[in-house]
Image (cartoon, rainbow, N blue to C red):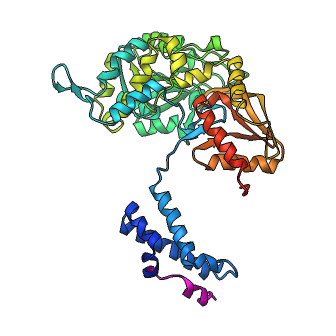
Amino acid sequence: MADRQLLRKIPKMDELIQNDMINALQQKVGRDTLLDVIRQIIDELRQAILKNEPGFIPEEELEIQAIVNKVQQKIEQICEIQIRKVMNGTGVILHTNLGRSPLGEYTKDVLQEIAGGYSNLELDLNTGKRGSRYQHMKELLLKLTGAEDAIVVNNNAGAVLLVLSAVAKGKEVIISRGELVEIGGSFRVPEVMEQSGSKLVEVGATNKCYLKDYEKAITDETGTLMKVHRSNFKLLGFTHDTTLEELMQLSEERQIPVINDLGSGLFMDLQPYGYPYEPTVQEVVASGCDIVTFSGDKLLGGTQAGIIVGKATWIKKIASHPLTRALRVDKLTLCALEATLKQYLHPQKALQQIPTVRMMTISPDELEKKAQSFKHFLPEEIKGLRISVEKSYSQVGGGAYPGHEMESRSISFRGNEETTTQLERYLRTGKPAIMGRLSEGAYFLDVRTIFESDFSVIVKRLNDWTQRSDPR
């Protein structure tokens, strides 16, 4: 049976409402929300007692001050913005869980100006008449990619869905079996095709696909040929791919459009920086592809968006499709994307000003200097953990350059495994949150993905941790 005596000790609502600290909380959230929180906490205590587990609820937790403290904590949680800043020491540049590409200073300045007021989102300031929200970056995209036309939607999966719906609904889409990829979150290319109303026609084998496979599959019902870049995995060994050049030749002969889903959206060749070959947007557009789709928040280094470029005839058809409005982007996305793209007008500027590109191309020597600069502010040891600079390896992440690792530098904390685990939790759950990496009993902060402006904040958090008596 439930402990009736404990149930009677739960304070009444009237008692709690009269408490001065509780009353003060009304100024933060209002009376209705405050009452809801108090009821929730009282109900949780009652349910815990009804579970009839001896000692499940200590009597001190039923005291008014203990409940007031719980109410205060809950109200603070309600008032706090749940999406908050995280400092990334994992070494994964495009960390999907951490929001992928961080934006550069110029982009942040422009965003702040536009977000705080009104803008000419759909107004032509020259004529004073209504304009198009896509016009602001259309010319910029055409200049950078060489395409005839362009449009932007909310993400690349949406871009692919829109393209297939506008171009191939009710028609066959021919694609290699080896390119039927899962984009992420169980979102797969065949499922996108199904939703668009187009009919999937798989050709070739998983590991080998030839031009003749596409040729044999073409019928009067064929709407388009599709190529999906395998940006998030590698296919190695006994393999063969139909090249884009071969596919474009077939496209010209049969007068069938080609859709190329590039995914990551690379704007500059990174081979000089030790990366394997990856097709750039400019290369694919120059090949004659009718429609090219790619992301704004991966290798491009901007905000989440799905960018569609290609032949004017097809882009016009896509722009007039009803789904375009459902997938359209807001002023902040367009603003952030335009500001990022502006940096590519001067490639050397992009290397320095776009954080994602900068992190991808920084040299091991520069990383060594950066790590030593960070280490300069730290002691040799914290709570028995030895601190040093160690060679490590970073990844691009975000489904880009799968399997490729870059030499990096990390601040390591080595010693007692229990202590390193406590340190990881303390940094991850604090404000600001700091994400590192636990490996083989040690804790690492990879400086490739940490901004130098955040060094002093991390040092302060570490100093605060050394002064804590509670190790958790």
Give the residue furthest to the left: 128
Q: Quadrant of residue 432?
A: top right
- Looking at the image, is 470 positioned above or below residue 314? below
Q: Position of residue 315 (x, y in %)?
A: 34, 22
Q: Position of residue 318 (x, y in %)?
A: 33, 27
Q: Is residue 324 magenta?
A: no
Q: Is residue 97 left or right of residue 318?
A: right
The answer to whether residue 295 is seen in the rendering is no
Q: For this rendering, which residue is in front, 124 or 148?
A: 124
Which part of the image, by quadrant, shows the N terminus? bottom right
Q: Residue at x 77, y 29 (%)?
A: 389
Q: Quadrant of residue 279?
A: top right
Q: Is residue 8 magenta?
A: yes
Q: For this rendering, which residue is in front, 128 or 277?
A: 128
Q: Residue at x 66, y 38 (%)?
A: 459
Q: Is residue 128 left or right of residue 85?
A: left
**Magenta part of the chain:** 1-13
Q: Residue at x 45, y 56 (%)?
A: 79
Q: Position of residue 26 (x, y in %)?
A: 39, 66
Q: For this rendering, which residue is in front, 277 or 448?
A: 448
- Looking at the image, is 30 positioned above or below residue 368? below
Which part of the image, by quadrant, shows the C terminus? bottom right
The answer to whether residue 436 is seen in the rendering is yes
Q: Position of residue 274 (x, y in %)?
A: 67, 15
